[in-house]
Image: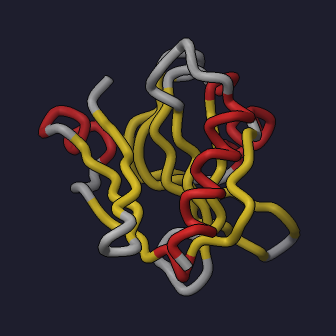
Amino acid sequence: MGFSYFFDTSANQLHIQLTDTASFFAMKRSFSISFEHIVLPIIANPEAARRVFLGFHWGTRIPGIFNAGTFYSLDMPSNMRKTFIYMRRPDRTIQINTVNEDFKRLILEVPNDFMDLEEEANRLTQLIEKSQ
């Protein structure tokens, strides 16, 4: 898939790992976000993935096929929201909201097709809660 995410409870950070090819398409290298800056709960929100393309982007967007990079969506008049997206299928995405970070939210495709989105979102939320 070109990317993975993992939660490092010893460092209290979420790590987003991009392969070289994925970095090319996303125009972003791998990065990390402190657990302190993640707004809980993490949610399964495929609808957000479908709505985010109302602004401009820095990355790759092939409608209906692949989206990766930094996207700016206009949520309200004059309120730009900077979002990092890496997905092929909006119906398989989770949303991670942040504060005091470069991105206001991350929309990531859950890499395992057999994983239930709600269960994965709840698992990740509980993982962060336990580490705080």
Q: Give the number of callouts.
A: 0
Q: Residue furthest left?
A: 20
Q: Residue furthest front?
A: 130
> Is 30 displayed left or right of 123 in the figure?
left
Question: Residue 19: percent from the left, percent from the top?
Answer: 18, 38
Q: Looking at the image, which is closer to me, 39 or 2?
A: 39
Residue at 34% of width from left, 62% of height from top? Answer: 8
Q: In this picture, is 92 found above or below 68?
A: above
Q: Looking at the image, which is closer to me, 74 or 118?
A: 118
Q: Report the quarter where the C terminus lies.
A: bottom right
Question: Residue 79: percent from the left, percent from the top?
Answer: 77, 74
> Is 102 displayed left or right of 1 in the figure?
right
Question: Residue 121: percent from the left, percent from the top?
Answer: 66, 44
Q: Report the quarter where the N terminus lies.
A: top left
Q: Residue furthest bottom?
A: 100
User: What's the coloring here?
Assistant: secondary structure
Q: Looking at the image, which is closer to me, 30 or 69?
A: 30
Would you identify the image quadrant in which residue 3 lies? Answer: top left
> Is 125 displayed left or right of 61 in the figure?
right
Residue at 52% of width from left, 41% of height from top? Answer: 108
Q: Looking at the image, which is closer to me, 7 or 65?
A: 7
Q: In this picture, is 86 found above or below 11?
A: above
Q: Residue furthest right?
A: 76
Residue at 37% of width from left, 49% of height from top? Answer: 6
Q: In this picture, is 19 found above or below 99?
A: above
Question: Residue 37: percent from the left, percent from the top?
Answer: 55, 79
Residue at 41% of width from left, 48% of height from top? Answer: 69
